Image: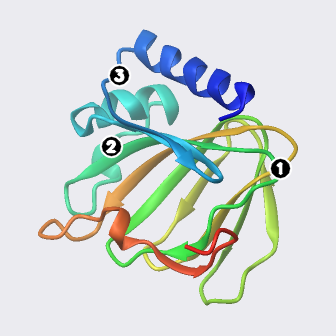
């Protein structure tokens, strides 16, 4: 792992600790960067800090929400993907990122988003987060749409992937 990547992850970990969040998973192994998973019981606290006090009750579809922090490396792309069992809401925390989205498998144009901007993704909507010139940090809340079968990493349907996954 590069020193810069380690620095970014350690800095985000420190910030989350100071903010009082319980990190239940930290993954630095992704070829595009990685993520932190926050305790689901802290969804409202997470929304207060990272989504401008958005009321999580307004986000609940099935009653279950999963907060995360995504870290995307410069000039890398997550897979072109969608999900059957969740919608998502993202907010840029740091850096400028690109987002492509579409209602079908054809990738849409890349839009740029800056810190403070929010992106809402519907269940089934194709999407891709893209690192541009610098490291991007994005807060994310999974909005589970099926309480009996909550979304997880297996609910990623990859249409295209730069890393052959």
Name the secondary structure under disc 2. Answer: helix
CA gap, disc 1 and disc 3: 28 Å
Q: If the image is split into quadrants, where does the C terminus sit?
A: bottom right
First along the sequence among labels 3 and 2:
3
Q: Which residue position holds label 2?
A: 56
Residue labelled with disc 1: 132
- Whether residue 8 appears in this view of the structure is yes
Seen in the picture, residue 62 relative to 26 is either above or below; the reply is below
Q: Nearer the viewer, mark 1 or mark 2?
A: 1
Q: Position of residue 102 (x, y in %)?
A: 65, 80
Q: Is residue 69 visible?
A: no
Ranked by sequence position, the earlier of labels 1 and 3 is 3
Residue drawn at 28 percent across, 55 percent down: 60
Q: Position of residue 151 (x, y in %)?
A: 29, 65
Task: Residue at 63%, 26% (x, y): give it.
Answer: 6
* Vertical comparison of 61 with 157: above or below: above
Q: Secondary structure at mark 1?
A: loop
> The residue tagged with tag 3: helix, strand or loop?
loop
Vertical order, 113 against 36 (above or below) = below
């Amino acid at each position: 792992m590069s020193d810069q990547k380690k620095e970014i992850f350690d800095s985000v970990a420190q910030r989350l600790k100071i903010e009082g969040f319980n990190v239940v998973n930290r993954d630095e192994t992704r070829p595009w960067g990685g993520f932190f998973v926050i305790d689901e019981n802290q969804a409202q606290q997470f929304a207060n800090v990272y989504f401008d006090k958005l009321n999580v009750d307004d986000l609940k579809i099935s009653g279950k929400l999963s907060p995360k922090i995504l870290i995307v490396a410069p000039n890398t792309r997550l897979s072109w993907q969608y999900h059957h069992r969740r919608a998502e809401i993202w907010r840029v925390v740091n850096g400028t990122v690109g987002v492509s989205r579409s209602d079908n498998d054809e990738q849409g144009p890349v839009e740029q988003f800056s810190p403070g901007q929010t992106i809402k993704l519907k269940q089934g909507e194709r999407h891709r987060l893209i690192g541009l010139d610098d490291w991007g940090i994005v807060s994310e809340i999974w909005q589970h749409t099926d309480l009996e079968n909550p979304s997880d990493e297996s609910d990623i349907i990859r249409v295209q992937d730069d890393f052959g996954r």
